[in-house]
Amino acid sequence: MEPFRLHENLVKLRMNGRAKLDHSLFDLSPEAGTRRALTVRLLNLLIMAPPLLTIAVGVLVELAGESFSWDIAIAAVGFGVGFGLLISIGFDLPTGVSWGILLSLASGILFGVEAIRVFLGDANLATIIGGVVLGIAFEISSVTAHGSRMGLFHTSVWCFLGGALFLLGFDVARALLFILLSVALRLRLPLFLVESTVTLLLVLLPSVMKIRYSSMIAFLPFRYHEMIYFPLPGLRAFLLRLTAENGPVGDHLIEVAASRIAQRRSAHLVVIELQARSLESAAAERLYDEVAGGEIPRMIQYPLPENDILSYFSVAANELRAASRSRNHQHRRRVIERAAEALTEAELRASRLRWPRSELKRFLITVATWREHALERERRELARDEILHPQVPRVFKPGPVLGPENRTLFKGRQDLIALIDHDLAGAHRAAIFLFGQRRMGKSSLLNMLPAQLGRGTLVGILNFQGLSGVEFRSQPHRWIGREIRNLWPHAEPSPDSPAWRETLDWMSEIDRSLRREDRRMLIALDEVERLEDGIRQGWANTDLLDLVRAAGDTLEAIRFLLASARSLRRLGPHWVDRLINVLPRELQPLGQEHARDLMCNPVPDFPDIYPEGGVDLIFKETCGHPFLIQLVCDFLCIILNDKGEIRASAEDLERAVGRSVKSAAVFQDLWNDRTGNEREVLQDLASQKKVGRGAFPVCRALKQEGYVAGEPGSFRVAIPMFSKWIDRNG
C-alpha cells in the first residue's frame, strides 16, 4: 500500500496527528485490528524504505564511477530511523514516520555521496543524484504526513528550486540535468515504461494462451499505484474485453480505474464505448422499452452527467416503441419521423462537440446503427402493412378548435369572413356579435381571422371560458388592456385602474396611432356567455358592456367582436340594452357543397371511403353541423381501420352514426341551453308527436336558432342525430 492510501486510511480512522505508536499497537477498541494493520505498514515503510533506497542509490553512484561512503550512509540511515521511532512514541505515528524517512534518506544518501563537495565547488553526477533523491525523500515524507497533493507540491518546489540553485552556483547544463532527472524520477518514467509493457502483455496473453482476462487482474499495475501520471496503453482494450467476459468484475475494475488520476479518461472512454454498444445492441434487438426507461445495463452503471446525447436516444426509443405498438398507419408514420428527428439532433449534437468532449463523437456510429436497424426496419414494416392492411388516414378532428395548421378542415365561412372584413371598415363602428350553436366553429373562425384579414389587421383573441379564474375577472377591461399592449407593444402600459373609462382613454391614443399608420385592430372575446354567468353569480358586472358600447361610439380603428353560443335575447336584457347598435352575425351550419367538401377533401388525396349515397346521408343526419360531420367521419375511419378495409358499407355508416349519437357530448350542452318549455317541445318532436298551436311560438323561436325545421303542423327537430339523442336521453 502506497503512502497516499495510507494517509487516506489514517484520516478515516482519525489517526493523523492523534495516535502515538504505543497507543496504535496496543489499542483494544473495535477498530484495533485496522489500526494495528496500518501501524505495521507505516513501520515497515519507515524501517525498510530508507535502507533499500539508500543501497539502490549507492549502487547507482558506484556504477557511475563515483565513490560512495557506505559506513557513513548506514550510520546516517540508522540515525534517521531511530529518530523517527522516537517521534512516533513521543508525538504521533504519521509525523514520526515522515520525519524519520526524511532524515534517514536525506542524511544517508547525501553523506554517502559526499554532497558537501557541492559547497566546495567540486560538484559531480553523484551530488546531482543526491539532490534528486533528497527531493524524492522529501516527497515521501510529505505524502505520508499530508497526502499526495501536498507531496506533489513540495516535490515540484524542490525540483525547480534545486535547479535554480545549480544554475546560480554552477552552469546551465547541470541545472537542466538536475531538473530533468528530478522530473523523470518524480513522474516515475522508468517504472512507467515497465508498467506500460506489463499492461500491453496482459492484453495480449489471454488471447494467445487461451486464458481468461479475469485471471490477469492481479497483475494490473494501476491497482497497486494510484499516482501513475500517464494513461497506460492497452488498459482500455483490457477493460472492454474483461467486461465482455465478466460484467460485474469489469464494472468494479472500471470504477477503480476511474478513481486513478491518469486512468480516468481511459475509464470514461470504456464507459462511452459500452454505452454505445449497449444502444446498438438494443436497436438490433428492439429493446425500445429499456432505452426509453434508461434501463440498459451499461447506461445505469456508468452514468456520465455530461453525456446529454443519451437523452436523444431515449426520445427516439420512446417514439419507436409507440410505432411498434400502434396499429394506426398514420400515427406510426408520425412517430417514426419524430424518432428520425431525435436521431438527427443527436447526430448534430455529437458532430459539433470539441475537446474535451470530443470522445462522445463515438455516438455518431450509434446514430447510424439506429437508422439502419431501427428506423429503416420500422419503415419497412409500415410500408408492408400499408400494402397488406390499407387504412384510412384519421384526419378528422371532432372537438379540438381548428388552427391555421388545420386549414384544410376549415370549409366555407368565406362569405362570413368577407362580411366581418366589411364590418371593420371605417364607416362602421359598432361591435360585431357572432353567435351560433355550440361546436358550430366560432372559435375556429376566430383563429382563422388573422390570416384571412391580412397583416393590416391586428387580431387579439381572449377566451372568456376561463374568465372565473382570471386575475381581473371582475374587471375584464384590464385583461383587454394587456392584450392590446401585446398587439401594439410601443404603446404606453395599460392603466391599472378599476375604472374602465381610463382604459378607454388609453385606447383612444392607440386608435389615433393605428389610423395614422392605416391599420386596424380587432379584439375578439370568445365565450362571452361566461361573463353573463359571472354577472348572475355576483363576481362580475356590466362594466365591460359599457366599455364595448362606448368604444363603438368613440373609436374607429379598434373594434370588438363578441362570440357566444347564445343570442343577445338569451344572454339577458342588459346585453340588449347596452349593445343596441351591435352588428349580429350568425354562424350557421355548412351548406351541402361545403359539407361535401369537408367529407371528401379533408386533406389532399383523401380516399373515397363512403358507400353510395353515404355523403348525402351524413349531411342529412348532421344537417351540415361541422362538428357532427367530423365526428361521424372519424368514427367511420375507425370502423374501416378495425376491419382493414378502405371502403365503407351502408352498415358501417349506420354504425358510425349510432356511435356518434351515443358519444357526442355536444347534444347534452344543446339540451342544457334550452328552457323547460323548449325541452318539452323538442321531446315531443323527437318522439314524432304533433304539437298544438300553443307550442307554435316556441317552435318558431327554436327555428330561428336552428333547432327546429319545418312549418306549423310539420315542425321537426332540425338535426336528425339530435332528435335520436333526445329520444334516447331526453
Image (cartoon, grey):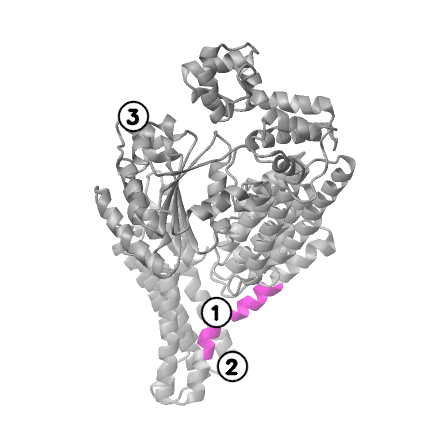
Q: Is residue 28 left or right of residue 656?
A: left
Question: Which mark is on residue 64?
Answer: 2
Can you give x and y, in whole percent of width and height, for residue 398 in the image? 56, 33
**Residue shown at 24% from the left, 50% from the top:** 505
Q: Position of residue 27 (x, y in %)?
A: 32, 43
- The tag earlier along the polypeptide, 2 or 3, is 2
Give the camera-side residue of 730 and 513.
513
In percent of width and height, residue 29 lies at 32, 39
Dot 3 alpha-carbon crowd within 10 angstroms: few under 14, some 14 to 19, many 20 or more: few
Label 1 environment density (alpha carbons within 10 Å; few <14, some 14–19, many ≥20): some
* Kind of residue at disc 2: Ala
SS assignment at label 1: loop
Question: CB atoms at circles 3 and 1 under 8 Å apart?
Answer: no
Q: Considering depth in this image, is 644 or 122 the residue closer to the camera?
A: 644
Quote the CA–CA distance across marks 3 and 1: 86 Å
Give the CA separation, mark 2 to mark 1.
22 Å
The residue indicated by pointer 3 is 536
Q: Is residue 15 visible?
A: yes
Q: Which residues are magenta?
A: 180-197
Tell me, for residue 187, which label it has, or none: 1
Of circles 2 and 3, the one toward us is 3
Q: Quadrant of residue 136?
A: bottom left
Q: Residue at x 21, y 41 (%)?
A: 498
Left or right of residue 324: residue 166: left
* Sequence-first tag of 2 and 1: 2
